[in-house]
Structures are given as C-alpha cells and as structure tokens.
Image (spheres, coloured by chain):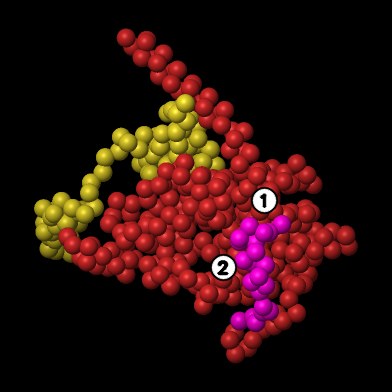
C-alpha cells in the first residue's frame, strides 16, 4: 500500500475510535508527538514523587505516613506504566532517562514548586492530583492503545490521591486557627500553578490542533482548565477557605466561573528551568540514578552468575 | 558491564478460573526479579493471583497490516454463528 493509502487507513481508524496499536502503521509525526507526550507524562510522575516524598518522614501520624507512602509508590508505578507505553513506540528506557537527566525532556512545571508545610501535601492532593485527573480521564479514550490502557489503570488509582489530599485539608480547616491558616496559605501558593498545569491558552498552544485531530488530546487546555475552576469553587467553599482570585465570579450567561489572568511569564520561566525547585529536582534525580547504579549492576551480575551455575548443573 | 535489563511482558490472572491478561511491561535482570517487580508495579491493590512474565523478544505476533488477507477465510462464514439458524420459538433447550 502507498503512504497515501496507509494514511487513509490510519485516519479512518482514528475517526471510528479504533485504537492504534504499536505495530500499526502511523504517521511519523504521530509517533514522535506521542513519544514526547507519554514520556513527559512519565517523567512528571517520577519527578512528582519528590515534593511529596519530602514529607513522608514528617507526616503528623502513622496513618498519614502510610497513606503518603502508598501515594508516592503509586506515582512511581504510574511513571513505570507510562515508560512502558512509550517504549512500545520504538524508544528505549535508556534513551528516555537520558532525555530527562540531560534536561532535554520536560516534565510538568507544577513539580518545580516547594512543599513548605504539611498543608501543601493536602493542597497537592486536592489541586494537583485533581487537575491531573481532569486531564487523564479523557485520555482513557486517547487514540493510542497502550497510552489509553495505562490511563485507565492510572485513573483507578488516582482518585484516592485526590481524596487523601482533600481529607488532609478538611482536617486542618476543622482544627485550630493556626491549622486553618496553614491550609489557606497552601491554597494561596498552589492555586495559580495548578491552573497552569493545563498548559498555555488554546491560541498559544502549537501542538494542540494536531493532537486534537489525531484524538491524542480529547479536550483543549482551556476547556479542561475551565472545568477544573468550576469544580474547585464549591470544593473550596466546603473547606471554608478562599481561592486567591478576586476576579473569580459566576457568569450566568456562560454558566461558568470567570477567573482572573494567569501569570504566563511565571509559567514560561518555570517551564524553562527558572522555577524555585527545578535545579533541586534534577539534581535529586541524577543523584538517585548514579547512587542506584550499583544495584542495577549487581542485579545483572547476579542474574548472569545464576544462569551460568544452572548451565553448569545441566551440563 | 551491561546494565541494560531486558524487557519483559507481564500477564496477570486476577481470580482463579479467569485467563491471564496483558498488564504491561517492565525491565528486570531475570525472571525472578521480573515477577517480583510485576507484583510491585501491577498488583498493589491485590489485582492478581497469578503472574506470568515473558521476555518481550519471545513474543511473536501477527502482522496488523496483513490482517485483511490473514483473516479473510473466516470473514464470510456466517453459518459459524448460532444466530444464522432459523428455528421455531417453541423449541427449547437449544
């Protein structure tokens, strides 16, 4: 079949919501876009372990410690599902890690902010995982099979993440004045970066149009961001804390909440490496990779030794 | 020293009597580590009673581009389906 005909078969599958699988013919740009998107999603999960991991030793109770440990474990798992999905497209794990460690690949800018108090852990669960869920649920129907299936698995696990975060904030907001102030402070610092998680405005997002055409992306950045704001307003009301946006107001005509302008300068600064924790995140990841090398080498050496011993026994 | 751990495909059976389903892949030095890693990555919520791991290089698959001709013989044999047969409504147990 000619490239024309192959493209027609491909477009037809996408149109009819038939999943594209790794061995199917696909346009090279589709493959490259997906490798980029899936791998950056994976990197985000792994880097995302750091801001919350920092509070495992300082969780206020044993129950909270167990829960936070389980959440961070899940994030590692999510990263692994996604790396596996990316690898089906003809890139190796080594290449993916190299892209992250060299700074060539991006990861979600939200993880370049510091977790300053225990309330931050609550805010992350509520807002950051909340935004992630809003993005990931539609991705369960993304056109590429392995990515969609990974997203189904991720979504099942993600809802406890958001609930544990919200529950943390609920406990704080129903506690002492200091605890409630801590919760409000965390909301003040995490609100705008969470809105930035949905990416640039639609008219400023170069990859979006093609991604929507190929059903890699099912909703636009602005659509998801609006949905998120609408949902959070009521959730904040139940907590009894205030979203730090003086322009937040119900618009009866649009049937959505209007909200204030996002500081896109800050967004691009953080994406391009100048956020509060970019250097720390990357240094920590590189150190973990180096410090763990002996474990990987030992595992391979032991496997080789075992194989040889079994070979000798058989001989 | 080669530290490129081979790639394994993971299959999980969630309950006695069901079949193993493909859950994803992972890297591990050998089969035992692959099984332990599969437990940690794919069964954190008791999703499995049985785990199979197979090195990815040992999996052979049909070619999706040839699906048309490959499956052609089965495509027009509608009489293989029970609904093809027109039988009276009063007929029971069939």
Segment colored magenta: A256-276
Which structural element holds mark 2? loop
Chain that is coloured red in the picture: A
Have a look at marks 1 and 2 and say if they share a chain. Answer: yes
Which structural element holds mark 1? helix
- Please give the residue where the numbered disc 1 appears in the rendered image: A279
Chain B visual colour: yellow
Quadrant of image for the C terminus of chain A: top left
Residue depicted at 47% across the width and 58% down the height: A37
Disc 2 chain ID: A
How many neighbours does mark 2 have within 10 angstroms: few (below 14), some (14-19), or many (20 or more)?
some
**Where residue A307 appears, x then y in whole percent?**
40, 19
Vertical placement of A230 versus B13: above or below?
Answer: below
**Where residue A200 appears, x then y in whole percent?**
56, 71
**Where residue B67 appears, x then y in whole percent?**
19, 54
- Please give the residue where the numbered disc 2 appears in the rendered image: A199
């Amino acid at each position: 079949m000619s490239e024309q005909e192959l493209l027609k078969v491909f477009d037809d599958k996408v149109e009819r919501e038939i999943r594209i699988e790794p061995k199917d013919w696909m346009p090279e740009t589709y493959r490259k876009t997906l490798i980029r998107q899936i791998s950056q999603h994976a990197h985000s999960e792994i880097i995302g372990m750091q801001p919350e991991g920092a509070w495992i030793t300082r969780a206020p109770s044993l129950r909270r410690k167990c829960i936070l440990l389980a959440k961070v474990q899940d994030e590692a798992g999510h990263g692994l599902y996604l790396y596996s999905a990316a690898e089906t497209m003809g890139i190796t794990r080594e290449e993916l890690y190299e892209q992250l460690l060299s700074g060539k690949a991006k990861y979600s800018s939200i993880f370049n902010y510091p977790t300053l108090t225990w309330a931050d852990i609550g805010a992350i669960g509520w807002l950051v995982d909340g935004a992630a869920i809003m993005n990931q649920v539609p991705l369960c129907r993304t056109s590429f099979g392995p990515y969609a299936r990974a997203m189904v698995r991720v979504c099942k696990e993600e809802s406890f993440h958001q609930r544990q975060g919200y529950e943390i904030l609920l406990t704080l907001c129903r506690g002492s004045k200091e605890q409630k102030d801590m919760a409000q402070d965390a909301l003040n610092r995490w609100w705008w970066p969470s809105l930035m998680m949905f990416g640039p405005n639609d008219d400023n997002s170069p990859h979006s149009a093609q991604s929507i055409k190929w059903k890699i992306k099912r909703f636009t950045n602005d659509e998801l961001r609006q949905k998120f704001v609408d949902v959070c307003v009521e959730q904040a009301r139940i907590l009894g804390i205030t979203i730090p946006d003086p322009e937040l107001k119900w618009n009866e005509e649009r049937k959505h909440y209007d909200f204030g302008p996002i500081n896109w300068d800050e967004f691009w600064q953080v994406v391009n490496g100048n956020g509060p924790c970019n250097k720390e995140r990357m240094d920590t990841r590189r150190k973990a990779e180096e410090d763990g090398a002996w474990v990987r080498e030992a595992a391979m050496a032991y496997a080789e030794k075992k194989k040889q011993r079994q070979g000798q026994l058989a001989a | 020293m080669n530290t490129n751990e081979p790639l394994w495909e993971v299959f999980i059976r969630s309950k006695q009597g069901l079949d193993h389903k493909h859950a994803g892949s992972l890297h591990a030095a050998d089969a035992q580590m692959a099984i332990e890693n599969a437990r940690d990555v794919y069964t954190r919520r008791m999703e499995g009673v049985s785990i199979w791991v197979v090195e990815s290089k040992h999996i052979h698959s049909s070619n999706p581009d040839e699906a048309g001709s490959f499956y052609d013989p089965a495509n027009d044999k509608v009489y293989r389906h029970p609904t093809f047969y027109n039988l009276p409504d009063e007929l029971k147990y069939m």
